[in-house]
Amino acid sequence: MIKHVPNTVFKTRVRNDALDGPNPFEWKDLSSDDIFKGKKVVVFSLPGAFTPTCSTSHLPRFEELYDEFKAQGVDAIVCISVNDAFVMYQWGKSQGAKNVFLLPDGSGDFTRKMGMLVCKDNLGFGMRSWRYSMLVDDGEIREMFVEDGFEDNCPTDPFEVSDADTMLNYLKS
């Protein structure tokens, strides 16, 4: 297992109210340091926005337990998916996500460097992230919970250890 989060630049979109017109958003690059340096961050990664388990269980539970994570000294909860910034924005909007930061890994660069990129052509998804969660403290990975069965075109979608409750229980222990 790697010890530090990989150095990556994430292509995000942020609102700029100074922009006129129907699209008040602009591109903003965020580096791994911007996200992790000097912070205690819980990260969870999932196969895709708008997919069933990700939308009904994975994201909602982290959102629901946000205050409990904050009480354990967590500065931020970040959801990473190999989706572009536009998809992540719309997914967050449809989910009513207010606390979890949805971080697009559009090219899969971070996920690849984490060793978590898998092919999901059997579902028509292409390259996506394997489901996992991790605790990152100042860029250093302290703990990872990786779902069993890591393989390309996995016929199932394991969701046993990358969930919010497992991470919260780890933080409380």
Image (tube, rainbow, N blue to C red):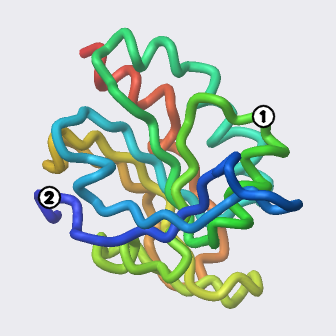
Q: Is residue 76 above or below residue 12?
A: above
Q: Is residue 41 left or right of residue 129?
A: left
Left or right of 23 on screen, residue 83: left
Mark 2 vs mark 1: give the one in front.
1
Q: Amino acid at mark 1?
A: Gly
The reply, left or right, for residue 22 in relation to residue 159 is right
Figure check: 55 above or below 154 = above
Snapshot quadrant of residue 128: bottom right
In this view, 34 is above or below 72 = below
Instruction: Please name the residue that numbered disc 2 is placed on.
Output: 4
| Residue 56 locus on image (x, y percent) | 77, 41
Residue 38, image x and y in percent?
16, 37
Residue 15: image tag: none
Give the residue displayed 19% in from the left and 45% down from the top.
Answer: 37
- Which secondary structure lies at badge 2? loop
> Which residue corresponds to mark 1?
96
Outermost residue, right direction? 22
- Mark 1 packing: few (<14 Cα in 10 Å), some, or many (20+)? few
- The image quadrant that residue 97 belongs to is top right
Please state which amino acid type lies under the numbered disc 2. His
Image quarter where the C terminus lies is top left
Residue at screen point 50% across, 82% down = 107
Task: Please tell me which residue lies in front, 147 or 136.
Answer: 136
Residues under numbered marks 2 and 1 in contact, where contact means CB atoms less than 8 Å apart? no
Q: Quadrant of residue 24?
A: bottom right
Tell me how many marks there are. Answer: 2
Residue 39 location, x and y as percent? 23, 35
